[in-house]
Image: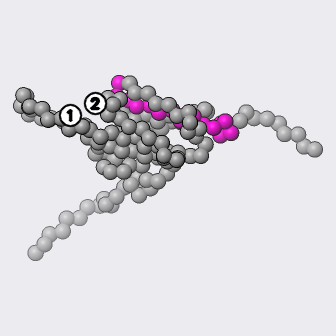
């Protein structure tokens, strides 16, 4: 007789179901939480700011590409063979490849995107086009 184990959890999360929202940082490859870095996205009056937590990597390990309205941040961890000198009782440090894709809205000035990397945080600034910025309140005269 076969035993069937049942759980109350769906085989997917809502984030996995709706991974196509603009500026949502969809994943291609590993699921979020396994090898995908955490991301913060903030909107200011003049731009969007994306911050990815990627400790243990260097600038040379990171690749940022813009293809039409898709911004891709990826890293391919180079495997280096080295002789193990220490005997670990527990080893949790592990850096793997990842890829995050952000679908940019039409309001982004793609020619002015900037990125910086410091202390394991990759920050990408996405400036808004002038017409997308919040306009000051004004009075409209009626003729």
Q: Is residue 112 magenta?
A: no
| Numbered disc in front, either 2 or 1 | 2
Residue 116 as seen in the image, left or right of residue 81: right
- Dividing the image into 4 quarters, which one contains the N terminus? bottom left
- Which of the 4 image quadrants contains residue 87? top left
Circle 1 residues within 10 Å: few <14, some 14–19, many ≥20: few
The residue that disc 1 covers is 93
Q: Residue farthest to the bottom?
A: 1
| Residue depicted at x 56% and y 36% | 111
Residue 74 percent coordinates (x, y): 36, 41
The residue that disc 2 covers is 56
Residue 85 percent coordinates (x, y): 6, 28
| Residue depicted at x 79% and y 35% | 138
| Residue depicted at x 34% and y 47% | 32
State the CA–CA distance, disc 2 to disc 1. 9 Å
Looking at the image, residue 54 lies above or below residue 1: above
Looking at the image, residue 87 lies above or below residue 105: above
- Which of the 4 image quadrants contains residue 136? top right
| Residue depicted at x 18% and y 35% | 80
Residue 132 as seen in the image, left or right of residue 72: right
Q: Are marks 2 and 1 in contact (CB under 8 Å)?
A: yes
């Amino acid at each position: 007789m076969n035993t069937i184990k049942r759980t109350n959890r769906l085989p997917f999360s809502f984030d996995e179901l709706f991974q196509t929202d603009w500026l949502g940082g969809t994943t291609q490859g590993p699921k979020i939480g396994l090898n995908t870095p955490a991301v913060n996205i903030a909107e200011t009056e003049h731009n969007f700011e994306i911050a990815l937590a990627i400790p243990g990597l260097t600038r040379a390990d990171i690749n940022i590409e813009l293809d039409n309205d898709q911004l891709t941040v990826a890293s391919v961890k180079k495997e280096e063979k080295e002789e193990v000198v220490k005997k670990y009782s527990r080893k949790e440090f592990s850096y793997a490849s990842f890829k995050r894709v952000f679908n940019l809205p039409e309001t982004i000035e793609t020619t002015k995107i900037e990125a910086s990397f410091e202390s394991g945080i990759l920050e990408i600034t996405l400036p808004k086009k002038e017409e997308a910025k919040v306009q000051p309140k004004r009075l409209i005269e009626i003729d």
